[in-house]
Image: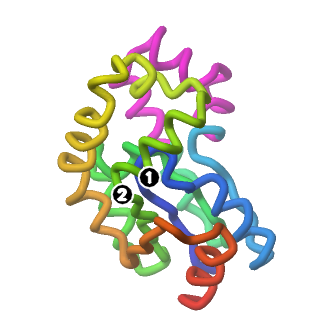
Amino acid sequence: MKKILLSGYMASGKSTIAQLLSKASGIPYRDLDDIIAENAQKSVSDIFSEDGEIKFRKLEHEALKAALSDDKGLILALGGGTPCYANNHEFLKRDDVMSIYLKASIPELLKRLRADGSGRPLFDKQPPEEQEEFVAKHLFDRSYFYHQSKHVILTDGKTTENIVNEIMSLF
C-alpha cells in the first residue's frame, strides 16, 4: 500500500491535514516529529537545544527511512525542513509514495505562525520585524525540495475539508 507524505513549511497544515485525511481514508497517520521524539525519548525542542540541528537531521533521516521501510499504508506529516536535508527529497519521488506539497503564501503562513504560538523554535526566536524576511528566505531556499513532491496543493483560502477532498481525488 502507498505511503502518503505531506510536505510544506511550518504551519502549512501538514499535521492537521494528515489527521483529517486519515479519518477520511482509513489509512493510519503519524507525524514524523512525534516519531523522532519517541525514538530519542525527548521533545524535538530539546533535541535542537541539547544536541543541535545536525543531530536532529540525522534522527529525522533515520526515522523517515524506517517509516517507509514496510509495506503498510501510512500518511506521514513531514517536518518543515525534512525534504531539504540528507537527500530526503529523494523519498518524495519513490514509486510507492504519493508526495504532496501543501503550499501556502507567505502572508498566510505568517498569519498562522503568529496565531499559532506553539513554540516553533526557528520562527519564535526571530524579532517580529524580521519574521516575514525569515519565512521568505526559507521558502526561497526550500522551494526546490518542496517541489520534488509529485503533487502541489495550494491551501490559501481553502478549508481543511476542501484540501482533504482534493487529496482524496488523487487516490
At a point 35% along the width and 20% down the height, the residue shown is: 126
At a point 77% along the width and 77% down the height, the residue shown is: 24
Three-letter code for the amino acid on which mark 2 is drawn? Ser
Magenta span main SS: helix
From the image, tell me which residue sits under label 1: 108
Three-letter code for the amino acid on which mark 1 is drawn? Glu
At a point 42% along the width and 80% down the height, the residue shown is: 95
Taking the image as shown, residue 155 lies to the left or right of residue 88, namely right
Q: Are marks 2 and 1 in contact (CB under 8 Å)?
A: yes
From the image, tell me which residue sits under label 2: 105
* Segment colored magenta: 35-62
Residue 164 lies, in percent from the top left, at 64, 75
Residue 158 lies, in percent from the top left, at 56, 71
**Disc 1: CA contacts within 10 A as few (<14), some (14-19) or many (>=20):** some
Give the answer, above or below, for where 93 lies relative to 42. below
| Distance between mark 2 and mark 1 Cα atoms | 5 Å
**How has the structure been colored for display?**
rainbow
Callout 1: SS:
helix
